Image: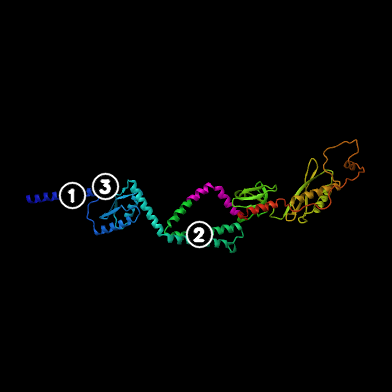
Amino acid sequence: MPIRRTASVALAFLLLFLSTSFVFAQDAVWLARATGATAPATPTARDAEIARAVGTRIRAVPGFSQVTATVTGGVVRLEGSVGGEDDRAHAEQIAAQQPGVVRVSNQLQIAGSVSTRLKIALQQVGSKLIGLVARLPLLLVAALIVLFAWWVGRTVSRRIHLSRFSANNPYIDALVARLINWIILLVGLVIALDLMEATAIVGALLGSAGVAGIAIGFAFRDIAENYVAGILLSLRRGFSPGDHILVDKYEGKVVALTSRSTILMTFDGVQVAVPNALVFKSVVSNYSQNPKRRFEFAMLIDVNESIRESQEIAIAAITQTKGVLADPAPSWSVDGYLSGGIQLKFQGWVSQRDSDLGKVRSEALRAVKSAYEKAEIDGPRPVQYSFSAPLPPDIARRIGMAVTPPPDNEPKGGADTSVNRDIDAQVDAQRAAHDDENLI
C-alpha cells in the first residue's frame, strides 16, 4: 500500500509538472506572437537559399544597396537604412513576395543624414538613366509603331468619302474619319506601350480620362448639348444653306450649321448665331422647302358696291399680275362686314424659284387698286360732307353729274417680281468663312 500510494503521488506530481510546462510553453508562444519576437533557431539550407534570393531582388532596386536580409525558420529579417517610409514598405513587399517566406520582420531604419538621402537619390536617378538608355532601342521601335499607326489612320480617314460608308454629309464623313483615325492611333499606342511593358499606363489614363470627362461634362453641359444637337441636326438635314427659315423668333437665310450654333443672315443683313440646342427643340418653319408659297391681302370696299363685281375685277387683276401662278389659281373670300365697309381677302400663289413673294404681293395689291379705280369701285366713306363749291368727281358721279375721268397715273409695263437677292452676296461670303466647320 505505501509503495502504491507513493507511486500515485509521484505520478500526480509528474502530470502536474507536465501540464504546467505545457501551459508555460503556450503562454510563451502567445507572448512571442503578440510581441513579434522570434524564437532563436538555426538557419537551414532552405533559409540560406531564401536569404540569397531576397537579397538579390532587394539589391537590384536603386537605393536599396544598404539593405541586408537574413532568414531563420522562414522569417525574413530586414536590416539597414533606406531613403524614406515608402522605400521601407517597398522592401518589405519585395521580401514578402518571395516563395517560402512565412513572415517579414522589418527592422529597416530611415536614413537621417542629408548626405545619405542624397546618395540614395542619386543612385536611384542613375539607375533609371541606365535603364532608359538600355531601353532606347525599344523606345525607338515604339515611336515608329505610333507614327505608322498615325499614318495609316490618316490614310484610311481621307478615303472614307470614297467608300460605301460615306453618308453624303461632309460633317458626318469628317466625324467618322476622325473617329477611325483616333481608333487606329490608339491601337498603335497600346501596342507600343505593351512593347515597353507599360500597359498599366493605359488603365491609369483611361481611368483619369473617365473622371475628367464626367467633370468636364458637368462644367460644359451647354456646350456638349449644342454639339450633340448639331450632330443630330446634320443627320436630319431639315434645312440647307440658303434656305429661308424661322426658328423661334429668328428669321433669315441659313448660312451654316456649325458644331455649336446655326448661323442665320436676317433680311436686314444682320448675322445671328442661334444655339443648336434651341434649333433642335424649337419648331422650325422652312419657307424654302416647298417652291410654291401663298400670299394674301385684304381690300375694303364701300357697302354700296357690288361684292361679286369687286371680286371678279380683283381676281382678274391678280391673275394677270406677273409672278402669280395659274395653278393653284387665285382665290378670294369675304372676310367681314366692318363698320367702315366690306373687307374682301384675296390669295395667290407664287413660285419662290422664280419670283419674290413680297414683290408679287405688292404688285398684285397695286393691280387690284388700279382696277378698282378704273371700274369706279370706291372704298368706304364713313364721313358725310356738305359742299357749296363744285362737287368732287366721285360725289358728282353718285348724283348723276357728268365728270371728267381721272388721269391714269399707273406705270405701264410689268413690275419687277424677281427673286430677292439683296442678301445673297452676304450669305455666300459668310458661308465661305464657315466652310471648314459647316455641318450641312
| Secondary structure mostly taken by the magenta-highlighted segment of the chain | helix
Q: Quadrant of the C terminus?
A: bottom right
| Apparent side of residue 46 relative to residue 249 in the rendered image (left or right) | left
Q: Amino acid at mark 2?
A: Leu
Q: CA distance from mark 3 to mark 2?
A: 57 Å
As helix, strand or loop, the secondary structure at mark 1 comes to: helix
Of 215 and 34, nearer the camera is 215
Q: Is residue 179 left or right of residue 105?
A: right
Residue highlighted by disc 3 = 35
In the depicted view, which residue is nearer to us: 126 or 17? 126
Q: Nearer the viewer, residue 179 or 430?
A: 430
Residue 185 disc label = 2
Q: Callout 3, which amino acid?
A: Thr
Q: Report the number of numbered marks.
A: 3
Residue extent of the magenta highlight: 211-233
Residue 70 to residue 301: above or below: below
For the residues labelled 1 and 2, the Cα–Cα distance comes to: 73 Å
In whole angstroms, how far apart are the C-alphas of marks 1 and 3?
Answer: 21 Å
Graded by Cα atoms within 10 Å as few (under 14), some (14 to 19) or many (20 or more), the crowding at tag 3 reads few
Tell me the crowding category of disc 1: few under 14, some 14 to 19, or many 20 or more residues within 10 angstroms, Cα based.
few
Q: Residue at x 48, y 52 (%)?
A: 209
What x and y, as percent, mark residue 354?
Answer: 74, 56
Image mark for residue 246: none
Q: Nearer the viewer, mark 1 or mark 3?
A: 3
In the picture of the structure, the residue carrying the numbered disc 1 is 21
Which residue reaches farthest bottom?
163
* Residue 109, percent from left and from top: 31, 48
Mark toward the start of the polypeptide (1 vs 2):
1
Determine the secondary structure under disc 2: helix
